[in-house]
Image (cartoon, rainbow, N blue to C red):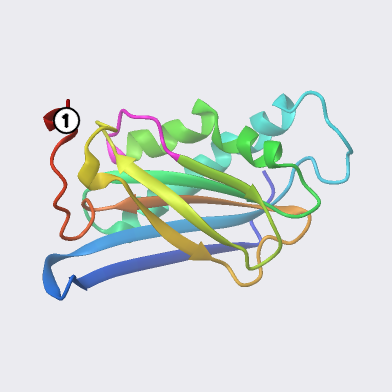
């Protein structure tokens, strides 16, 4: 894998929600790497596996410990994103993040068992994207269904992909929905 052009680390703490204090503060971290699209300039590539083999595990290994460290506490919810520059295909981003070679690094770092929820899209530098998060061991736990909005001012360039991981230390602040098991 080529060296990322940039790595962003974003930490959000919600201290008040609904006019009430959030104690402890609700903490969400995002770490995003801006990497060259391994298929850029090649036209339609039938077999994406060589690029996946070259990039997916390495980018997962780079990002997973960084997002856990940025969160600074136990991960309870997580998610991922691939934002492809305008000269790439959405499939290029999907190829890198929808493989165990990528996701298992985060699952191991977070002691998680569920699949990572994801967003994939194509867009220009500065595009806004929301990373969905779910509970790390039970995707039906409603309190942990949330998202975080991300915008990177100068990424992705047309021949780049932004790969991001998000981690939350808790569910939504002030969540009050009944458990899914209470519905018939």
Front-lying residue, 77 or 112: 77
Q: Residue at x 79, y 40 (%)?
A: 39
Q: Is 105 one of the magenta-colored residues?
A: no
Q: Quadrant of residue 92?
A: top right
Q: Is residue 119 visible?
A: yes
Q: Residue at x 33, y 40 (%)?
A: 109
Q: Quadrant of residue 181?
A: top left
Residue 177 point in image, percent of width and height: 16, 47
Front-lying residue, 86 or 51: 86
Question: Quick check: 178 left or right of 171?
Answer: left
Q: Residue at x 43, y 36 (%)?
A: 105
Please give the range of residues in magenta. 110-117
Give the number of callouts: 1
Which quadrant holds the C terminus?
A: top left
Secondary-structure class at tag 1: loop
Q: Main secondary structure of the magenta part?
A: loop
* Residue under label 1: 183
Q: How many neighbours does mark 1 have within 10 angstroms: few (below 14), some (14-19), or many (20 or more)?
A: few
Residue 49 point in image, percent of width and height: 70, 25
């Amino acid at each position: 894998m080529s060296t990322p052009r940039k790595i962003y680390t974003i930490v959000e703490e919600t201290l008040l929600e609904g006019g009430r204090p959030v104690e402890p503060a609700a903490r969400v971290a995002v770490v995003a790497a801006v990497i060259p699209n391994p298929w850029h300039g090649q036209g339609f590539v039938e077999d994406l596996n060589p690029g996946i083999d070259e990039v997916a595990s390495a980018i997962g290994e780079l990002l997973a410990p960084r997002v856990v460290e940025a969160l600074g506490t136990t991960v309870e919810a997580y998610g991922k994103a691939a934002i492809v520059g305008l000269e790439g295909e959405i499939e290029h981003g999907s190829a890198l993040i929808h493989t165990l070679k990528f996701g298992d690094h985060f699952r191991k770092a977070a002691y998680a068992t569920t699949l990572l929820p994801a967003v994939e899209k194509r867009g220009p530098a500065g595009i806004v994207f929301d990373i969905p998060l779910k509970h790390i061991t039970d995707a039906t736990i409603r309190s942990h269904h949330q998202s975080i909005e991300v915008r990177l001012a100068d990424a992705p360039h047309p021949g780049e992909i932004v790969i991001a991981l998000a981690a939350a230390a808790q569910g939504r602040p002030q969540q009050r929905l009944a458990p899914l098991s209470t519905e018939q």
